[in-house]
Image: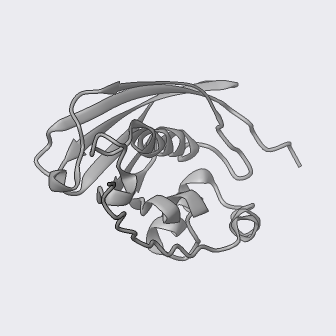
């Protein structure tokens, strides 16, 4: 006889994502990110869902963090690699965006993840540092490292993003 399943519940709230894009239309990428960090602009719904927090913003670099929790687990009892990939992709893409002018965007076109060790709730808060390697006219490259509070490496990634610049006025 199968054991009774213990159910849990997660409540997530978020703001309308189109409102945030409209409010940020005239902001540079760095200004938009600073608004999210400072709480004057809403983070994207995916960040709310996974409880990803923007901690630091600089020109060409960002730091995002999250607390691993049971809702992030795969059947093996570790944080799903896709969740870590979302964290890394967010850091890399926004590091690039931090260097772009108002109205520009940087969708990911290629991403590579290297998982070094498993992440669990016992790992504690992890941070993804995103750093720009190169921003060109049409393509940019960035990297990310996911570390714990002691600086232990859990994953490393690289990404290529397309540069979508705002049309000249």
131 in relation to 59, above or below: above
> Which residue ends up furthest to the left in the rendered image?
150
> What residue sits 49% from the left and 39% below the top?
89
Q: How many numbered marks does the figure carry?
A: 0
| Residue 135 in sight | no
Asked where in the image residue 162 lies, by quadrant, the reply is top right
The reply, left or right, for residue 122 in relation to residue 108 is: left
Which residue occupies the foreground of this view, 29 or 162? 162
Quarter of the rendering occupied by the N terminus: bottom left
* Residue 138 placement (x, y as % from top left): 70, 25
In percent of the image, x 72 and y 62: which residue is there? 21
Residue 165 position by quadrant: top right
User: As drawn, is 25 to the left or to the right of 110?
Assistant: right
Residue that extends furthest to the front in the rendered view of this protein: 1
Q: Is residue 108 left or right of residue 55?
A: right
**Residue 31: percent from left, percent from top:** 56, 60
Residue 52 versus residue 19: which sits nearer the camera? 52
Extreme-right residue of the structure: 169
């Amino acid at each position: 006889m199968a054991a009774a399943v213990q159910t849990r519940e997660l409540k997530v709230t978020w703001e309308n994502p189109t409102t945030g894009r409209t409010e940020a239309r005239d902001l540079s990428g760095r200004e938009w990110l600073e608004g999210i960090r400072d709480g004057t602009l809403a983070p994207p719904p995916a960040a709310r869902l996974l409880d990803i927090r923007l901690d630091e913003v600089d020109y060409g670099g960002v730091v995002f963090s999250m607390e691993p929790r049971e809702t992030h687990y795969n059947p093996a009892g570790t944080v799903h690699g896709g969740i870590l990939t979302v964290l890394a992709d967010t850091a890399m893409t926004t590091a690039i965006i931090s260097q772009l002018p108002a109205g520009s965007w940087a969708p990911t076109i290629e991403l590579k993840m290297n998982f070094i060790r498993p992440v669990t709730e016992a790992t504690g808060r992890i941070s993804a540092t995103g750093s720009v390697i190169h921003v060109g006219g049409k393509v940019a490259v960035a990297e990310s490292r996911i570390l714990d509070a002691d600086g232990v490496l859990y994953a490393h990634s690289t990404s290529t993003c397309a540069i979508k610049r705002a049309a000249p006025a």
